[in-house]
Amino acid sequence: MAQFHVLAVDDSIIDRKLIEALLRTSSYQVTVVDSGSKALEFLGLHDDDDDDEAVIPISLIMTDYSMPGMTGYDLLRKIKKSKSVKDVPVVIMSSENVPSRVDRCLEEGAEEFFMKPVQLSDVRKLKPHMLKGRAKGGVQPKIYKRKACMKENQSPNKARKLCDNNVLEVM
């Protein structure tokens, strides 16, 4: 069964541990880094070359807004300008409720803006964004078709139609 992979970016070790625990509780694969520059490195993006390929498929990126060196907003902008990971959904987190900051991040392409501490109810909002990211060209799900069982008095055309309509998405 394919799993969603979340990259969590936060300079606070306490917040990283909390986010990691919440994501793992929800059965997500998690990679945590402590800065925007390490996130870009992990994603295969570098300041001098935004055309690099992402090495590890990521379903969603969660990043703190306030970090030294590179803010979550700066990271969001670099991700959305890249060719390889621009369709990966990004969620911004902050302990400061600044409406203009929230609006700016959402306008720049963030899917959500969560207030810290992040709650399990927040994490439950992530899956639709990851599914949408897949549809836009992110990590593609594997598709399997089930074989339709023909009954004795069932026509072959009806069995073929059942088989064609019976598609499972593996996540």
Image (cartoon, rainbow, N blue to C red):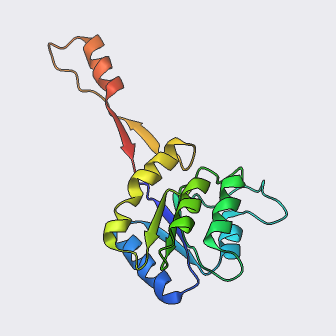
Q: Position of residue 150 (x, y in %)?
A: 22, 21
Which residue: 55% across, 66% down? 100
- In this view of the protein, can residue 145 be seen by the observer? yes
Q: Position of residue 165 (x, y in %)?
A: 33, 26
23 shown above or below 68 = above
153 shown above or below 148 = above
Which residue: 46% across, 44% down? 142
> In front: 78, or 133?
78
13 shown above or below 82 = below
> In front: 2, or 54?
54
> In front: 102, or 39?
102
52 shown above or below 168 = below
Quarter-of-image position of residue 71: bottom right
Quarter-of-image position of residue 126: bottom left
Which residue: 59% across, 61% down? 104
Where the N terminus falls, by quadrant?
A: bottom left
Can you name the residue that lies furthest to the right here?
A: 48
